[in-house]
Amino acid sequence: MKSKCVVVFPTAIKMARTNKGLYQKEVAEMAKISRKHLALIEEGHKEPGPQLRKKICEVLEIEEEYHVPPRNK
């Protein structure tokens, strides 16, 4: 039986961005946020709201439902 690999959102967006050869500044401009805000999301220090999360996924062309946020303990 195959297990499903779930990647947390910060890791997923950083991987997608670097795989596309994009800088944080470029993705941030397309998502209409600051580079610093994107950096904080990629580092896991900020959790984007649903609309921003959707926009980042659209910009990076990744499926939102496969990238669940880490669970709070």
Image (cartoon, helix red, strand yellow):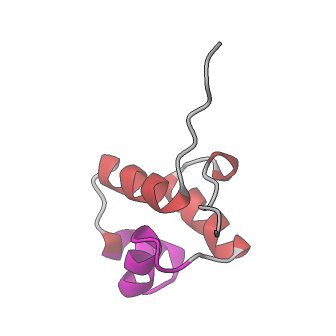
Residue 58 image-quadrant placement: bottom right
| Vertical relation: 22 (above or below) 52 | above
- Identified at 34% across, 49% down, the residue is 20
| Vertical relation: 63 (above or below) 40 | above
Is 30 inside the magenta-drawn segment? Answer: yes
- Identified at 58% across, 58% down, the residue is 57
67 relative to 35 in the view: left or right: right
Residue sitting at the far top: 1
- Identified at 46% across, 71% down, the residue is 44
Residue 68, percent across and down?
A: 64, 55
3 relative to 33 in the view: left or right: right
The stretch in magenta equals 25-46
58 relative to 50 in the view: left or right: left
Q: Nearer the viewer, residue 48 or 52?
A: 48
| Vertical relation: 17 (above or below) 3 | below
Residue 34, percent across and down?
A: 42, 87
Q: Main secondary structure of the magenta part?
A: helix
The quadrant of the image that shows the C terminus is bottom right
Residue 19, percent across and down?
A: 32, 46
Residue 31, percent across and down?
A: 52, 74
How many discs appear? Answer: 0
Is 1 inside the magenta-drawn segment? Answer: no
- Identified at 65% across, 12% down, the residue is 1
